[in-house]
Structure formats: C-alpha cells, structure tokens
Amino acid sequence: MATILVVDDERLICELLHVVLSSQGHEVLIASDGEQALGLFAKRRPRLTLLDICMPGLDGIEVLRQIHWIDPLAAVMILTALETDTLRQQAKEWGVTEYLTKGLPLDQLISAVERAIMQSEKRSTLMPSVSVGRQVGPDEPASILVVDDDEVVRDLLTDFLSSRGYRVLAAHDGPAALSMVDEQPRLVVLDIYLPGGMNGLKVLREIRAKRYGGGVIVLSGCQEEKLLEELLGMGAVEFMAKPFDLERLALAVQVGLILTKP
C-alpha cells in the first residue's frame, strides 16, 4: 500500500480517483488547489502525487516545481485535460514521472500508478540518504524563525527550510515570535497579517526594540507602497507577496543570511 496525493479542483475527478485507488489498497489524500496540495505534501510526504495542470491559484506546473524543491526525488504524475508540447517539456524538466491525459482507460491509469510507485520505491532504496539541505557555516546550520498564523503555510515553510539544512523555529502569533527572538535566530520570515492585536508590523518594531540585529523577510498578501517603505525602513531585507515561490524564497534566505552575517 502507498500513500497517494490527488490534486484536482474537479470534485468528481477526486472522488473517482479516490474510489479507484482505494480499491487497490492505497491511502488516498485529496487536495482541491495548489496551496492545499503543498501543505499535504509537506506533512504527509506521499509516495506518489497525481497532479492536474489547470487549477485556481497555483497551477500544476508551479506546484510541481515547489514539490521538487521540497523533495527532488518525489514521484509526480500529471493527469490533465490540457496537453501541449510546452507543458510536457516543462513537466519533464521538473522530473515528472508520467504525463497522462484525462479520459484514458482506468486500467491504464492503474498500471501507470503502480509503475510509478515501484520506480519511487527503487529510488528510495538506492538513494536513502539524499539530502538537499544547505548549511551556512562549517559547524552548525543557521537558525530561522518562521512567523505565520496559517498552519499550512507555517508547516510548509518549516519543512522546506529544514530540508535545506536550516534549524527552524515556528511561531503562530506575535507574542510567540517575540519570545523566540530571544534565541537569536539569524533570520526571521514574518507574515504581516497575524491574529490578535499584534500584526507583523508591530512584531518587527518590537524585535528591533529588543535590539535584534538579524535579517527579516516579510510575507504579505498586500503590497501597499506606504507599508513597504515602513518595512524597508526598519531593515527588512526582502518583501514577498503571497502566494510566494519557494525557489525565490530560498534565494532570499541566502541573501538575507549573507547581509546579516555576524
């Protein structure tokens, strides 16, 4: 039995695949959009992901890219109604196992799934110690504090940054973040919209008042010019709009660590 993540915004497709794959003895997880898919992938690490291309928000190619930033050995199959040479090439470049079109006979789909699972198991056996972690400094990894009230985003960032070799602390609100800043993380990844009376802007003011000298990367769903100026004025090294690209975040983290090198 394998854990399989099905990602599709069409409810009937999800239900059909759930019934078919469960009948084969697999555990089936369902996600209706890209962000939900990344959260489930980070938490559960399915053996195989069945991924649609056309979805609201993050499309299938972007989800594929971010999955492979989390785990370069992840087995992903595209199952979509959209087929072009460009999409096939993009999927191939990001290591997709197979590119299938919707409407194919179920026995062919089941065979493709079993084949992909077998290939994934062989790779795991041959390469059990593969790691994409990156450490800063010769002795220990840099520490990063992630502050976000969205559990899915927080878990995704924690898992992704941990897989890159960083030591990650996580806080769900402002007061928790302020207490963890006392541990002197090298970098803070900070959401602007937080619950309670302390939003990200107030958190940034408070940690600067505590004489925290590390770097701060700000995440936000809004891009108000006045807000940006205030954040940059308090020493934020980067501002990233949601939904963000994990590849760009990885680069921003590296730059932030260099700029705040002790």
Image (spheres, rainbow, N blue to C red):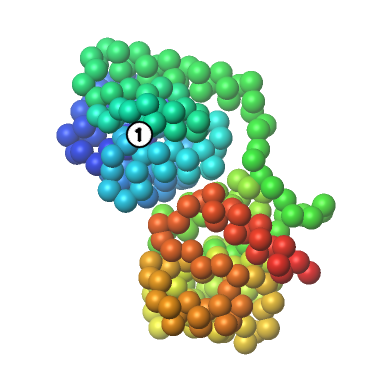
Residue 23 left/right relative to 233: left
Question: Hey, which quadrant is residue 40 in on the image?
Answer: top left
Q: Which residue sits furthest front?
A: 85
Q: Is mark 1 on a helix, strand or loop?
A: strand
Of residues 78 and 20, the one drawn nearer to the viewer in this rendering: 78
The residue that mark 1 highlights is 51
User: Residue 114, image x and y in percent?
Assistant: 40, 16
Residue 95 left/right relative to 162: left
User: Residue 175, image x and y in percent?
Assistant: 51, 78
Residue 45 in the image: above or below residue 127: below
Residue 200 in the image: above or below residue 45: below
Of residues 239 and 144, the one drawn nearer to the viewer in this rendering: 239
Total numbered labels: 1
User: Residue 240, image x and y in percent?
Assistant: 48, 64
Residue at 55%, 31% in the rendered image: 73
| Quarter of the picture holding the C terminus | bottom right
Residue 228 in the image: above or below residue 59: below
Residue at 40%, 71% in the rendered image: 223
Residue at 30%, 18% in the rendered image: 109
Mark 1: give few (<14), some (14-19) or many (20+) Cα within 10 Å. many
* Residue 3 visible in the current orientation: no
Q: Which residue sits furthest left?
A: 12
| Quarter of the picture holding the N terminus | top left
Q: What residue type is labelled 1?
A: Leu
Question: Hey, which quadrant is residue 258 in on the image?
Answer: bottom right
Residue 76 in the image: above or below residue 208: above
* Residue 122 visible in the current orientation: yes
Residue at 24%, 25% in the rendered image: 102
Q: Which residue sits furthest bottom?
A: 209
